[in-house]
Image (tube, rainbow, N blue to C red):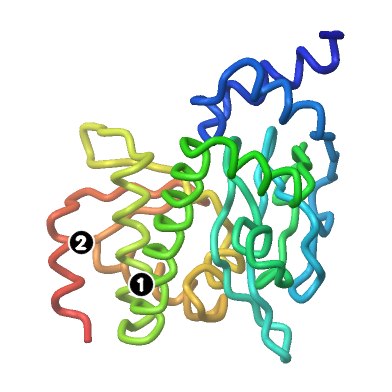
């Protein structure tokens, strides 16, 4: 196995989707994989484009979003190392249901759709992992629909801050501290609203003492109090 292919096999072995494949299966996958490089802000694919390949994030981050006719964006998610893109159209032969943009400089692995489908037929373990990925994304989308349909901007914002505190926060003597990974415009896209409402609600939470802010650094002095606020917001 020459160096380039051996390098790809080693990379694939570290990705959650392929960890259960044998060396022979990994070599088969690697023989059909190529690398694509994108600068930050570059379009990877657009909603409605035909899908011909499975894409997997090797380095960097990718923003998945939908756009309205008036130009507003709804952020679906941020995909990081090891995450796959466009699994559904790879299997159903449809077009991309959303758009993807490099949120940072990114390297993606490109595997033609027909090759990936063939490998799934040969490897039940890989097919089961794909089903788990699809199931996780369906649950995420159901939660997103529920939040956008039945929750106010303030409640969505608080719930998002609590998730960040739980996932990435560090305990300090003055509460849980974490960094906002997005600016207010990007946060508005995630929450299905506009930047002005995000800024206003962050300011109100700060004014009420429920959070403390310094640029993108957030500290939650009392997570229980912030959690209780969700129940009071209609």
Question: Residue tagged by mark 1?
Answer: 156
Question: Residue tagged by mark 2?
Answer: 226
Quarter of the image for the C terminus: give it.
bottom left
* Residue 162 spot, x, y in % from top left: 29, 55
- The correct choice, above or below, for 22 with respect to 146 in the image is above
Front-lying residue, 110 or 113: 113
- The correct choice, above or below, for 171 with respect to 54 in the image is above
Judged from this view, the residue extending furthest toward the front is: 122
Left or right, 39 with respect to 122, comes to right
The residue at the point 53 percent across, 65 percent down is 187
Find numbered disc 2 in the image and state the secondary structure of the residue it sits on. helix
The residue at the point 54 percent across, 72 percent down is 188
Left or right, 224 with respect to 77, comes to left
* Residue 14 spot, x, y in % from top left: 57, 22
* Residue 164 spot, x, y in % from top left: 37, 49
Find numbered disc 1 in the image and state the secondary structure of the residue it sits on. helix
């Amino acid at each position: 196995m020459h160096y380039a292919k051996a390098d790809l096999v080693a990379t694939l072995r570290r990705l959650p989707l392929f960890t259960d494949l044998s060396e022979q299966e990994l070599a088969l996958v690697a023989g059909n994989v190529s690398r694509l490089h994108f600068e930050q802000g570059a379009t990877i694919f657009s909603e409605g484009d035909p899908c011909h390949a499975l894409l997997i994030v090797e380095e960097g981050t990718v923003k998945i979003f939908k756009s309205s006719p008036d130009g507003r964006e709804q952020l679906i998610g941020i995909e990081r190392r090891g995450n796959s893109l466009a699994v559904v159209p790879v299997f159903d032969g449809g077009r991309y249901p959303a758009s993807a943009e490099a949120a940072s400089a990114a390297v993606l692995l490109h595997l033609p759709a027909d090759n990936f489908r063939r490998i799934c037929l040969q490897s039940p373990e890989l097919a089961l992992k794909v089903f788990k990925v699809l199931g996780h994304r369906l649950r995420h989308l159901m939660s997103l629909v529920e939040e956008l349909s039945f929750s106010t901007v303030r409640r969505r914002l608080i719930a998002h801050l609590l998730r960040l505190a739980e996932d990435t926060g560090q305990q300090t003597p003055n509460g849980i501290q974490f960094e906002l990974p997005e600016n207010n415009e990007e946060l508005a896209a995630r929450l299905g609203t506009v930047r002005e409402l995000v800024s206003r609600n962050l300011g109100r939470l700060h004014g009420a003492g429920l959070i403390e802010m310094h640029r993108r650094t957030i500290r939650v002095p009392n997570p229980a109090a912030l959690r209780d606020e969700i129940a009071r917001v209609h």
